[in-house]
Amino acid sequence: MRTVKVYWSMPMDIERFFASEESKDIGFYYITRKFGNNETPLYIGKSYHSFKSRMKSHEYWLKEYRGEILIRLGRIISPNWYFWEEYRQLINETESILIYNMRDVLRENVSNTKSVRVSEDTLVINFGHSSIIPKRIRQRA
């Protein structure tokens, strides 16, 4: 079984996100909306180029929500990959696992909500500031 460890950053508001050095990295992002005392999961996505460039494609629907938009960034800590195509596949499969397992609460995701396909049995371990993302997710191939 393959184990993927994902570290999630502290949540940041939009302005802080766009100003941060972290926005230049790649990996996963988790968007939520805080309104009053409630935080609502909205979207999980991936980025191959930079979080900042990917987030710009979501600006149009993010403006529809009242309250504060928060973004957590997820980076694969383990395994380490040296070949881009293998790393890209790992990002794709891990994103698919995350979305599929949270499909009932994510308001904006439409892909990966009906099924998930992975190349091998996978355990995703989420740590850091993952909010309601399950700490451990097992997915069979």
Image (tube, rainbow, N blue to C red):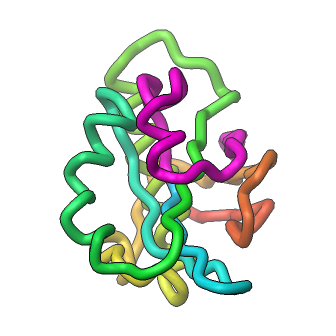
The residue at the point 29 percent across, 70 percent down is 63
Q: Nearer the viewer, residue 30 or 15?
A: 15
The magenta stretch is 1-29
Indicate whether 24 appears above or below 132: above
Look at the image and say whether residue 78 sits in the magenta stretch. Answer: no
Is residue 99 among the parts visible in the rendering? Answer: yes
The residue at the point 80 percent across, 46 percent down is 128
Estimate the x, y position of residue 110 in percent, counting from the top left: 28, 77
Estimate the x, y position of residue 81 in percent, counting from the top left: 53, 18
Is residue 101 among the parts visible in the rendering? Answer: no
Indicate whether 73 appears above or below 124: above
The residue at the point 68 percent across, 67 percent down is 133
Estimate the x, y position of residue 117 in percent, counting from the top left: 40, 62
Estimate the x, y position of residue 140 in percent, counting from the top left: 59, 64
Look at the image and say whether residue 3 sits in the magenta stretch. Answer: yes
Residue at the extreme top of the image, as rendered: 82
Q: Nearer the viewer, residue 123 or 121?
A: 123
Q: Quadrant of residue 91?
A: top left
Q: Nearer the viewer, residue 49 or 72?
A: 72
Is residue 125 rendered to the left or right of residue 100?
Answer: right
